[in-house]
Structures are given as structure tokens and as C-alpha cells.
Amino acid sequence: MPAACHPALIAGLNPVWIAVGILLLTYGVIMTERLNRAIVALLGAILMIATGILNQEEAVAGIDFNTIGLLAGMMVIVSIARKSGIFEYLAIRAAKVARGSPAGILALLVLVTAVVSALLDNVTTVLLIVPVTLVICTQLKVPPYPFLLSQVLASNIGGTATLIGDPPNIIIGAQVGLSFNSFVYNLTPVVLIILVVHLVAVHVFWGRSLQATPAARARIMAMDENAAITDRSLLVKSLAVLTVVLAAFVGARFIGLESGTIGMGGAALLLLLDNLGRPAGKQTESVAKVFNEVEWITLFFFIGLFIVVKGVEHTGILRVLAGRMLTATGGDLQATGLGILWSSALLSAVVDNIPFVATMIPMIKAMAPAFGGPDGLMPLWWALSMGACLGGNGTLVGASANLTVAGIAERNGVPFRFLTYTKHAFPMMLVHLGICQVYWMWRYL
């Protein structure tokens, strides 16, 4: 669009203020939760185009289709795999391994949640594990709140460990070009330490006080985990495809494929295997059912958000803010890294960590000249990942998984209040971030 036709210039307004205003308005409305966040993000994106901050080509170019492809692909894989009953099997099996002990079940479900969250996204994990947890708590006649809270924290802890475990990591990996192996190598060690600390804290605060009658424990032991597997053929196919996908993530640099391509490829392969031998009409019905379970709200939220952030980046204001942060820290790597770690954590506790990370990435990229190029930014990316993923545990609105569990809990008559959650979770989040600070300074300085 020629400058003379630029609506922002015609109105006599500074494009920076318009773009920042749209960003703040978008974030503010999202935080109120009065409108669905996908609607808000898409309206923000339209405003960026309508006000002339971006033209349509620039807006489309701002969408990270690698991230969208990875998310959509993994959603399809999980949608198909869940039909086999594998996730219910894992939860029931964990309860029986603990011999029906509430404390043991609490610890094992935390471990299952953390491990599954590292291999799938954490929102999907809690959607699969929490309903089974509620059934187990009902059978044991124990309060479900400690189980749900500990699983929320575990999902965000486990999700920090890998590229595909938490949406902030998916965005960072896709936009910065970091591999699955890079996340495992840099973040899994500290996640394991934090998980151990979390397990100890959960036992001290809740586990040791939980009691169940012999009859209640007997009901758990009588549950048949094998009955949860409703389709063994699909189970084998799903596990085979997940193995291939994870292997492709590990070897992505050798096979020359991006994470989005791998995710979509795995989805297409599992769709094929799930529908082989069915009549065409049944295939259409099956595929439509799978696609109906894809979290389109999340995908369109990402699309709108990418355009909103692109509009702000387009004005150059993020480069200015990056320069001011460098001035404040004196260009010192330690001060900058710790500033990103703690500011990311504290802000992600009050603002959904997905839009926060999307805004921070171009700002950190603008710091590259001060640290000797893109390679010099690597410690900062890990600080951003740890801060955003673990900071999301701080309050109920800090991460999508938190709100997902709260919604399931409320629908099942389990109070899951903002202040109660924050009272328990925020201090634990600070401990986890303290561990991250020590780890980051030891490893990268």
C-alpha cells in the first residue's frame, strides 16, 4: 500500500501507538474472559489490517504455519489415539501399581501427567488424564483438588522439557529454528530436578494426609485397566505412528524436515492407517469426526495472534524496547538472561504465556547484534522457555492447561478458585524458578 494511502497516516496518528493500542486492547479483552480468545485475536488481526499497519500479504506472511502445522498434526494424532483407550489405561494402571494408596496414586499420576505432557501438548494431556482422575478420587472417596492442582503443575513442568510439550516451546522452536533435540538437551535436566522437588512438595502438603478405607482401595484394585483398551489394533497403529513421529523429531536435521511437516505427516499416516479397508462413506464419517475434535479455537487464536504481533513488530517498537532492555542491563548476558527468565515467569503468571512469548520473540531477536549474532541468543531462548512455561503455573490464567482443568473441575462440582489456586501454586512456581536460575547460571555463564 502506498504511503499516501496509509490509513494511519491519513488519520494523522502514529502507527506505533495504533499497533500497541491494538495489542494491549487484544490482551486486555482476552484477560477478561468475556469473549472467546479466538474471536478477540482474529478481531485484533483484522484491526491491524484495517488501520493500515499491515497489508494482507504482510499479515499472511506473519502467520507461522510451521507452528500451526505442528499443533494441528499432533491434535489429529491424539484425537485418533485416544479412541484406543491408552490414556485411561495408563491412569488406571498407575492407580493399581500404587495398590490403591491415595498418596501413591497422587505421585504416580503426577509422573504420568509430566511424562505424557512432554510427548504431547499439556492441554491435551490434562483433557485425557483429569476425567479418569476424578473417577479414581470418587472411588477412593478422597478430595480431588490436590490431585488436580498437582497435575496442572506437572503438565506445565513436563511440557517444558520438549519442543512439543508446551505451546510456548512450539512457538519458540518454530520461529527460532530450534530442534526437538535442542530442547531435550537444554531443558530436560532441569525439568527432572524440578519434577523431583514437585513430587516431594506434593507429598508433604497433601499426600501424607490422604486416607482411604480398605473397601475404597479394593474398588480401585478391582478396576480392569485392560478393559479400557477398546481397540487394540488402533493402539498398535497409534503407538507405531507416535514412535515414528518422535524419531523424526529427533532426526529432523538429518532428514531435512521441519516440525510442522513431521506433525502433519504423522497425522496423515495415522488417518490412513485408521481408515484402510473402510468404505468411502465410512472414511468420510471417520475423518470428519477426528477433525471435529481438533481444537480449532486454539489454532485460530494462534493465527490471529501471529498477525497482531507481526503488526507491532512491523512498527519497529519491539526493536526499541529491546534496545532499552539492553541499556538497562548494560548489555550483560547474565543480567539480560535473568531479566528475561523472571519477567517472563511473572508476566506469564498474569497473562496467558502464549501471546506473551509471541511478543517476546521478535524483541529478543532484535538483541542479536549486541550478543554477537543469533548464536549468542541461545541462552536467552532457554531463559524465555523456562520462564514462560513454568511461570504459567503461577496463577489460574497463566497457561491454557490451568483453565482447561478448572473448567473440567467446575463442571464436575469441584471448586477451583483463582485465589485458592494462586495461594498454593505461586510459591511453588517461585521455588521452581529459583532452581531454573541456578541451573541457567551454571550452564550458560
Image (spheres, rainbow, N blue to C red):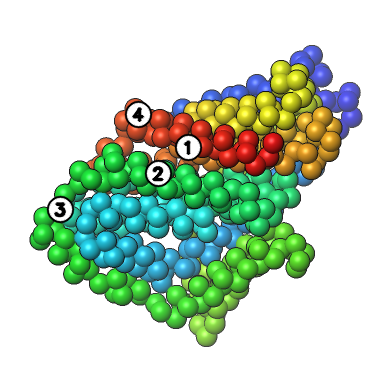
Q: Residues within 10 Å of mark 2 (few under 14, many from 20)?
A: many
Seen from the viewer's position, the closer of residues 109 and 437 is 437
Circle 4 or circle 2, nearest the eye: 2
What residue sits right under mark 1 in the picture?
432
Instruction: State the SS at label 4.
Output: helix
Q: Amino acid at mark 4?
A: Lys
Distance between mark 4 and mark 3 Cα atoms: 26 Å
Q: Which mark is residue 212?
A: 3
- Above or below residue 357? Residue 268 is below
Question: Which one is earlier in the sequence, the residue at label 4 or at label 3?
Answer: 3
What residue sits right under mark 4 in the picture?
423
The answer to whether residue 345 is visible is yes
* Quarter-of-image position of residue 262: bottom right
Residue 409 position within the rendered picture, expressed as x and y whole percent measured from the top left: 31, 44
Whether tag 4 and tag 3 are in contact, CB under 8 A, the answer is no
Distance between mark 1 and mark 2 Cα atoms: 8 Å
What residue sits right under mark 2 in the picture?
198
Whether tag 4 and tag 2 are in contact, CB under 8 A, the answer is no
Instruction: State the SS at label 1.
Output: helix
- Screen quadrant of the C terminus: top right
Circle 1 or circle 4, nearest the eye: 1
* Quarter-of-image position of residue 339: top right
Question: Which one is earlier in the sequence, the residue at label 4 or at label 2?
Answer: 2
Q: Amino acid at mark 1?
A: His
Q: Amino acid at mark 2?
A: His
Residue 326 position within the rendered picture, expressed as x and y whole percent measured from the top left: 75, 23
Question: Which one is earlier in the sequence, the residue at label 1 or at label 4?
Answer: 4
Determine the residue positioned at 37% across, 47% down: 199
Distance between mark 1 and mark 4 Cα atoms: 15 Å
Whether tag 1 and tag 2 are in contact, CB under 8 A, the answer is yes
Determine the residue positioned at 85% across, 26% down: 5
